[in-house]
Image (spheres, coloured by chain):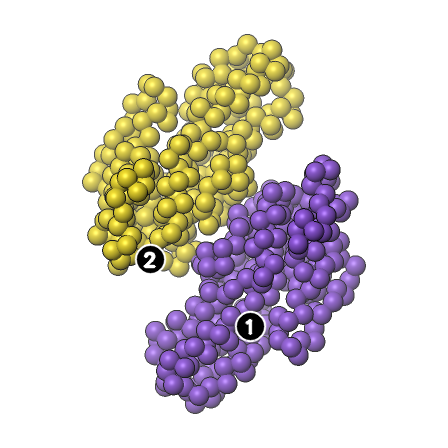
Chain colours: A yellow, B purple
């Protein structure tokens, strides 16, 4: 039994959504001469993410893709600040699509390139397929498949997402590893029999980040960044790919 | 209005399934000292493709992925030849997976690399996602997404496949082009409002090929190979990507 496919959580694990959004929204603000605390707005926007998906999960909202949840929460946050009038529909569309233009962390692309030699690589994200395709193009993520939440019409951590991806891969869960910077995501995957890889991203939520600083369970692979993850995974007993696959830290650094 | 995404039919359009399968099965026969007319077997195997999907389409069979249809038709063809006993289950699995190891036509990869600069590229195939992911890896196809038939639980030319891909892309059909070597596929796409690109593959079925030698309708783009397709598309009024995108034939040759 060996891991054959890696599914990567995307926001936070592979791409730095916070810095990317702050940079893009700040530039927009300068161009429009708008005085807004963009960092605060981005943090509030992200904070609206879990509750908005929860409304879909409980059935309070019918199935709604993340692009539309992002758009609605942005509109609400601007309205609360008395700023809604300053944004046209085209502006809202443009800013919502800033989530399609997120920069990868510095170790992301080179680590994925290395891992791709040995494993099928996919995204398993609450983003919808169209958003993920744009991200793959923008951040040049070398993955073979984007398992967006709209394929399953469920958001993580609903089991339909993890098991749906395994089913499309035609692999049993124990041959699939979820790689994520978030313990809740790994807990859900582990409960279904998937393998688990933790990558610490202690700056995902900015310098004051408190949660997900460290692994909270004995995940199959625990690492401080994605280079370290690749090295540890390739020398793990979960992987049987021959001696040539076991590489040293410096080969990946 | 401009084309933003290209969906490629895969078997025949991007990869040369016939030569690839004949080569792989012949090598298997040599290794096992089996005297089989492998070319004939491959042609019969492919001929079983449309009827087997038709059984799913009519409901005679419940939803079944192409891997399983391939496996069942191979088993039947071997049984008809009195050869079933010479193949273990592992052999059948291995040979069925020859469909995951098909070589691209010589113009495929370089043309896709060029087109990827301007368009979202996806596969839209009757293959299942796991098969397509393996093909993408094996043939090094630079596409962002594999829209396998199991995403829709329908086979082309059912409308659910073409419209399902447009819906996941969040694009109206007129901004999506199907690129295929098969007129029936383009007819189905055109009827739903998608744009159409024909690429002649006159050797797909071998030297005696009779059908799909030429375009049978005035498709939006008609070309003799994929390099020519890229050149014609990039200079087409369907595409508005600025003057720099209009390249000459020799730039792509």
- Apparent side of residue B16 relative to residue A183 in the rendered image (left or right): right
- Taking depth in this image into account, of B121 and A111 the one nearest to the observer is A111
Residue A248: percent from left, percent from top? 25, 44
Marks 2 and 1 sit apart, C-alpha to C-alpha, by 31 Å
- Taking depth in this image into account, of A135 and A59 the one nearest to the observer is A135
Residue A121, above or below B61: above
Residue at image coords 59%, 72%: B50
Most distant residue in the right direction: B218
Residue A53: percent from left, percent from top? 44, 34
**SS class of the residue under badge 2?**
loop
Chain where mark 2 sits:
A
Q: Which residue is mark 2?
A: A172
Is residue B58 shown to the viewer in this render?
yes
Chain where mark 1 sits:
B
- Apparent side of residue B243 relative to residue B140 in the rendered image (left or right): right
Is residue A174 shown to the viewer in this render?
no
- Apparent side of residue A152 relative to residue A209 in the rendered image (left or right): right
Q: Of tags 2 and 1, which is closer to the observer?
A: 1
User: Which image quadrant: the N terminus of chain A?
Assistant: bottom left
Residue at image coords 49%, 55%: B140
Query: What numbered label is drawn on residue A35?
Result: none
**SS class of the residue under badge 1?**
helix
Residue B211: percent from left, percent from top? 70, 73
Residue A243, above or below B78: above
Instruction: Find out whether the residues at labels 2 and 1 contact each other: C-beta distance under 8 Å.
Output: no
Q: Which residue is mark 1?
A: B18
Most distant residue in the bottom direction: B82
């Amino acid at each position: 039994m060996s891991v054959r496919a890696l599914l990567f959580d995307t926001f936070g694990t592979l791409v730095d959504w916070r810095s990317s959004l702050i940079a893009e929204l700040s530039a927009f603000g300068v161009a429009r001469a708008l005085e807004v605390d963009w960092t605060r707005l981005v943090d509030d926007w992200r904070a609206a993410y879990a509750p908005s998906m929860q409304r879909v999960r409980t059935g309070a909202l019918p199935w709604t893709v993340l692009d539309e949840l992002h758009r609605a929460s942005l509109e609400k946050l601007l309205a609360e600040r008395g700023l809604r009038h300053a944004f046209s529909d085209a502006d809202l569309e443009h800013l919502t699509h800033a989530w399609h233009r997120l920069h990868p962390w510095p170790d992301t692309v080179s680590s994925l390139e290395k891992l791709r030699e040995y494993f099928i690589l996919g995204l398993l994200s609450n983003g919808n397929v169209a958003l993920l395709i744009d991200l793959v193009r923008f951040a040049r993520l070398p993955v073979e498949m984007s398992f967006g939440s709209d394929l399953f019409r469920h958001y993580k951590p609903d089991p339909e997402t993890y098991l749906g991806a395994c089913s499309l891969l035609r692999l049993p869960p124990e041959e699939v590893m979820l790689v994520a910077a978030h313990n809740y995501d790994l807990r859900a995957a582990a409960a279904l029999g998937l393998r688990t890889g933790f990558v610490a991203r202690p700056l995902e939520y900015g310098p004051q980040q408190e949660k997900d600083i460290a692994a909270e369970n004995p995940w199959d692979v625990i690492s401080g960044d994605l280079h370290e993850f690749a090295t540890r995974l390739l020398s793990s007993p979960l992987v049987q790919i021959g001696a040539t696959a076991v590489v040293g830290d410096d080969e990946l650094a």
